[in-house]
Image (cartoon, grey):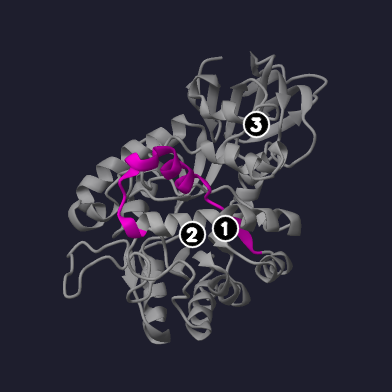
Amino acid sequence: MKALTGGVLIDGTGRDPIPNASVVIGDDGRITEAGALARLPLDAEVHDVGGRTIMPGLMDAHVHFMLAGEQDFESVFLKQTLEYMAIKATVSARNLLEAGFTTVRDVGAPGRLALSLRDAVNAGLVPGPRILAAGRIITATSGHVDLLPPGVSRVDGTAGRIADGPAEILRAVREQVKVGADLIKFCATGGVMDPQLAPDVSEYSAEEVQTLITEAHKMKKPVAAHVHGAEGAKIAIRAGVDTIEHGTMLDEETVQLMREAGTVLVPTLTPSHQVRQQGDAANLPAHVMEKFAVTSAAHAQSLTMAIEAGVLLALGTDAGTPFYPHGLNAIELQLMVQGGLSPMATIVAATSGAAKALRVDDCTGSLVPGKLADLLVVDGDPLTDIALLQDQSRLHAILQGGRAYKDLL
């Protein structure tokens, strides 16, 4: 049994911080007590963390382990082998854990890449966050992540699973379930990093989307939709989608539908920020820069509308995209605060809010009795300066399931 005592507790629920608090962790890695405790168990190994903050491990609802920040996005899909991607992914998993992210969701990778990494982490073969994996991304012909030239195929597959029409969509959903996907990811609209559809163009009809979501839910799998344009978002929301990824070009009707349905928004603000930071040096294809300009211009307003409407938010970063290697994910918290969310609401979105979106809130996401001790001990107050979470030297302890991955106490 271990006890952390004397720190300021931010428990991830949104409640006010508790000064001079203690968290007691049982031998099974679960929290037995948390709060302003009058006394500690006599058999506890006590660690004084006075002057520091105790908070839940961070969660990222949108990463891609197939990518590691490469500038040449398309070459990853067309030239890198799955074996090479797997090596990259193991490094990225370690980087994520070192950055304080104890649970992440991979929303699309070739073959069984993310699924295998998940299993390797669970088996203790490699260090990394708890991973939920979607398998391949279901997309329409000419849609987002349909990157292969006509007539060209790869034996090991790509991140996109092309499916057109209800019958093929049913097959695609069932394929992902068969290989062990934790959720289903599909593209409701065009994207930014490919030359095909504009971001506001819907890929699928209402019938196709309803078929996909109904089948996934029947198999007890949540569904995440890649969305930029409002019309694609509305089709997905009305069909019962669980999370909207990106949501860069929403409108008032869309955010009201999301609030009423309880649909979660995963904003992914950092990719466009990272590209803007590069300026002219980004040297991305013209079609990518043009699409970034369109989506970036609308993204801030979409987030503002969602916040004002009371839409549920979960932190997600799209880590792996150009100039955004895994491990820099905490930038997203700073951007969410700059976008109008309070520091406490941002921490909730990165902890218990993300846990609810990922359907793991029964075991993690907040520091309350019965939950796994996924937690950080941070030097400083992230409510005063959310950016300090980007400084790994200020993460004095990282615990996952009560096990210390980093412990400088």
Disc 2 marks which amino acid? Val
Q: Is residue 147 magenta?
A: no
Residue 294, labelled with which disc?
A: 2
Residue 55, labelled with which disc?
A: 3
From the top left corner, tell me how far across and down residue 309 is, in percent. 74, 59
Residue 152 in sight from this viewpoint: yes
Picture quadrant of residue 324: top left
| Residue identifier under label 1 | 298
Q: Give the camera-side residue of 381 and 91.
A: 381
Q: Give the camera-side residue of 362 and 1.
A: 362
Asked which secondary structure carries label 1, the reply is helix
Residue 124, labelled with which disc?
A: none
Q: Is residue 280 magenta?
A: yes
Which residue is rendered at x = 57% and y = 55% of the image? 299
Which residue is rendered at x = 83% and y = 20% of the image? 38
Mark 2 and mark 3: Cα distance apart in space:
37 Å
The answer to whether 97 appears left or right of 361 in the picture is left
Disc 3 marks which amino acid? Met
Mark 1 and mark 3: Cα distance apart in space:
33 Å
